[in-house]
Image (tube, coloured by chain):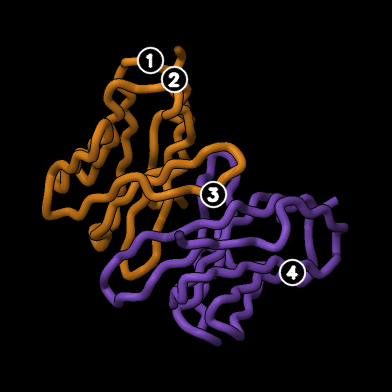
Amino acid sequence: DVKVTQSSRYLVKRTGEKVFLECVQDMDHENMFWYRQDPGLGLRLIYFSYDVKMKEKGDIPEGYSVSREKKERFSLILESASTNQTSMYLCASSPSGLGVHHEQFFGPGTRLTVL
Amino acid sequence: QQQVKQSPQSLIVQKGGISIINCAYENTAFDYFPWYQQFPGKGPALLIAIRPDVSEKKEGRFTISFNKSAKQFSLHIMDSQPGDSATYFCAAGDDYKLSFGAGTTVTVRA
């Protein structure tokens, strides 16, 4: 079974703190994604990576950065957390295939609260 | 703005009834239309998906209907069961990115 794990289920941080969310997948997938999920807005793509050290902005990258130093690990960084970044963060991975869609496998999510 | 519009926001159906969720899109570059199911405390999981060269796909009690000219697609859950109570997201894909709808919370009453 594909497994995508996220470092924390719940996280509480203060405004202005630097926050790291970690995601690890065990299926050798090339693609990894970070989404945020908010009620009434669904899932919105923050960043994705199609290879080690490669990254592309999604629909809402402002206030976030990412790092992918190893194939299995994709980190989301909030440089200076703000209250409007309080949300559920979901990591996903999928195998590669340019022009071909594959199922995305999601982790359980990290609920981040910024006070 | 949301590239995929999903409705209704929530619905309640009796056990054995039919649940219908609708989605619409504008971007004609989309060529992949999956539905994801999410239970509380879990990440979404792929339920069923369709490509625009077919108008319908059925897997068990779940059916996707696709209307390319109208740029609409829908999920039908037949013989709804309490275990189907979940949030359902439609999505549309181009390249390897997905754009998700806002989600529909389905509650099946026993």
**Which residue is pictured at 47% across the width and 22% down the height?**
B107
Question: Where, by quadrant of the figure, is residue B5 drawn?
Answer: top left
Three-letter code for the amino acid on which mark 4 is drawn: Phe
Question: Quadrant location of residue A13?
Answer: bottom right
From this viewpoint, is residue A107 visible?
yes
Q: Which residue is mark 1?
A: B15
Chain for colour purple: A
Chain under numbered label 4: A
Alpha-carbon span between mark 3 and mark 2 = 20 Å
- x, y (%) of residue A98? 30, 77
Mark 4 and mark 3, same subunit? no
Residue count near mark 1 (Cα–Cα under 10 Å), binned few <14, some 14–19, many ≥20: some
Of callouts 3 and 1, which one flags the residue occurring earlier in the amino acid sequence? 1
Q: Nearer the viewer, residue B99 or B13?
A: B13
Q: Which residue is mark 2?
A: B108
**Pointers 2 and 4 within a single chain:** no
The tint chain B carries is orange
Q: Position of residue B49 (x, y in %)?
A: 28, 50
Does label 1 lie on the same chain as label 4?
no
Q: Residue A36 sits in which quadrant?
A: bottom right
Circle 3 SS class: loop
How far is disc 3 from disc 1 in space, using C-alphas? 25 Å
> Label 3 belongs to which residue?
B43
- Residue at the disc numbered 4: A20
Residue type, label 2: Val
Residue under mark 2: which chain is it in? B
Tell me whether the residue at label 2 lies in contact with that at label 1, contact meaning CB atoms closer than 8 angstroms: yes
